Amino acid sequence: MPADTTLSEANHTPIEDYAIIGDTETAALISLRGSVDWLCLPRFDSSSCFTALIGTPDHGRWLLGPADEATTTRSYRGNSFVLETIHETPTGKVRVTDLMPVSDGRADVLRRVEGLEGTVAIEQELIVRFGYGKVKPWVSHHPGHSEDEEVLVAIAGPDMLIFRGDRLPVGDEGRHRDHFEVKAGERYDFSVTWVPSYKPIPAPLDTDRRIAASLDRWENWMSHCTYNGPHAEVVKRSLLVLDLLTDSRRGGIVAAPTTSLPEDIGGERNWDYRYCWLRDASLGLESLLRAGYIEATLKWREWLVRALAGEPEDMQIMYTIDGGRELAERELDHLPGYANSRPVRVGNGAVDQKQTDVLGEVMIAFESARDLGGQESQQSWAIQAALVNRLADHWDEPDNGLWEIRGPLQHFTHSRVMVWAAFDRAIQAVEEHDLPGDLERWREIRDLVREEVLAKGFNTDKNTFTQHYNTDEVDASLLLIPLIGFLPGDDPRVIGTVRAIENDLMRGGFLLRYRTQSGVDGLAGDEHPFLACSFWLVSAYAKIGELDKACELFDRLCDLPNDVGLLAEEYDPEEMRQVGNFPQAFSHLTLIGAAYDLHEARIASNDYPNEEIA
């Protein structure tokens, strides 16, 4: 995406036109024009108060941007999520700084407008709607914390938003507007703060101090990064996205901060991703570990122990941000959806699915942490061992698979491979880290699973592994076979699988997850290339020694993030637009993994020219 874009009005802002700010407990999406169109407070999985992203402006937004046509550029300041946007009009230039202060125990959005050149007319519109755009609050003026301060207060039920600013917008019916001019050298500060409605109005923040503290926090975090290969800025931004999506108070990692951004524009493939999938969190943890963030395992491990506490058979595939188990899926009929993509869903019915692969990802992440020197707690290992023993009794049952198939249960090959990985890593924990476990039984099952996968999950006529045991279709998840060590990269069966996936799933230069036309997922409509799968292909190329193809594909993929380095779940190569929930942890964590796999393979093969980093 070019960084310089001329703003225009449209029914629905392109997904890639959004930037994200956050405080590591929740996040806001801000359009290129300067409209906060999505914000859930105080947590990622709370209901939204600005919902224009999947509705209309009447469902809530906070616009602060140029009143006239403008050319806009934006970037994050350094390695942070302090967003700086430059709007240039025929009459002048302004800078808008947006952030959510990190780690201060509050829920605030701070916005600053500074005049840089000439004079720019600014438009502000504040529309607060609680309950995903459905509940219109009572809005009134209140005295602030000084004699001359006045604030706007929006209140409904348990929620209260306090609006402060050097200028207060005016209006009624829950819609407040303002137009004003900003001249060179002038500065206007604004803020929105959430508190429970029974609490008093909090004191204002010092914007200069909160900007400085937020910058220090993000830069200090990034200083621990060990990556020094190509596309370093893209990789670092992906690491920062994973950190932003990790709840700093509770330890859970959300898959994305949004719900119901469609995989198929205008279709029904719209899901709520504001929860903690054990799989996604484990894969994200692996990416952070590879980049040097060993301490990242500790808080997540504590979260996992709390979430899984209880009987092993009660393990879910996902939880709420605080480890809660209730994620009942429901539809919000009052919202039209992004680009009329309905239904709009909150909650996620996949919580009740059986996904046998999940424990494999968890065990891989924890074994990686142990290999890097992370100390295993007694309670954490006891839970892992109990889960492995539970898996030993049920590993051969069909499941819904990695992609949360809502069709009939199948014996998915990827699920079986990850069952093998769960036992393999549990065995390593006993053999290499002296942890207690049923070594003999685990070895027996690991070998049995491997034999079954090679016998039933591989099509000898086509020389490829298959999506499940009852099909000759392929699935991009099969690319993980060499990545987790089930087979080496030079095995002919791995190479044959890579070729079959290239032939059957490549669309516009990027990979689909699987062919939806096969009917395996039980849903109507189609979808676009899934970015994580293309990053897996980069890693697979690196494992089988096809470094030129790996480099070419990784270079193309690194051109896809928007102007501030963010990726959605999928990419539409025909319309050249991002699709699905945004930003997506899965896309960013696989980008990191692909970068490391390719970088390490090039070093091992002495593939770097002298002028490149090695």
Image (cartoon, rainbow, N blue to C red):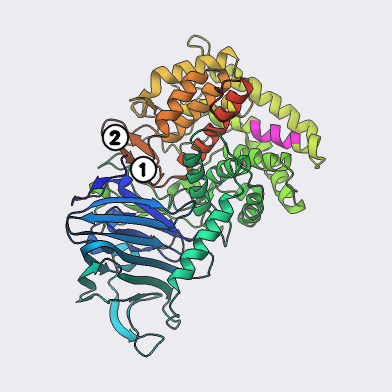
In percent of the image, x 57 and y 20: which residue is there? 607
Whole-percent x, y for residue 459 in the image:
51, 14
- Residue 417, compared with residue 581, is above or below; it is above
Whole-percent x, y for residue 594 in the image:
52, 32
In this rendering, position of residue 119 left or right of residue 107: left
For the residue pair 262 and 386, the one nearer the viewer reads as 262
For the residue pair 383 and 519, the one nearer the viewer reads as 383
Which stretch did the figure color magenta? Answer: 421-428
In percent of the image, x 18 and y 61: which residue is there? 67
Q: Please tell me whether mark 1 sits on a helix, a strand or a loop.
A: loop
Determine if the magenta segment contains residue 208: no
- Quadrant in the picture for residue 183: bottom left
| Mark 2 closeness class: few <14, some 14–19, many ≥20 residues within 10 Å | few
In this rendering, position of residue 58 left or right of residue 17: left
Q: Please tell me whether mark 2 sits on a helix, a strand or a loop.
A: loop
The amino acid at mark 2 is Met
In percent of the image, x 44 and y 36: which residue is there? 405
> Where is mark 2, residue-wise?
576
The answer to whether residue 259 is seen in the rendering is no
Which circle marks residue 562 in the picture? 1
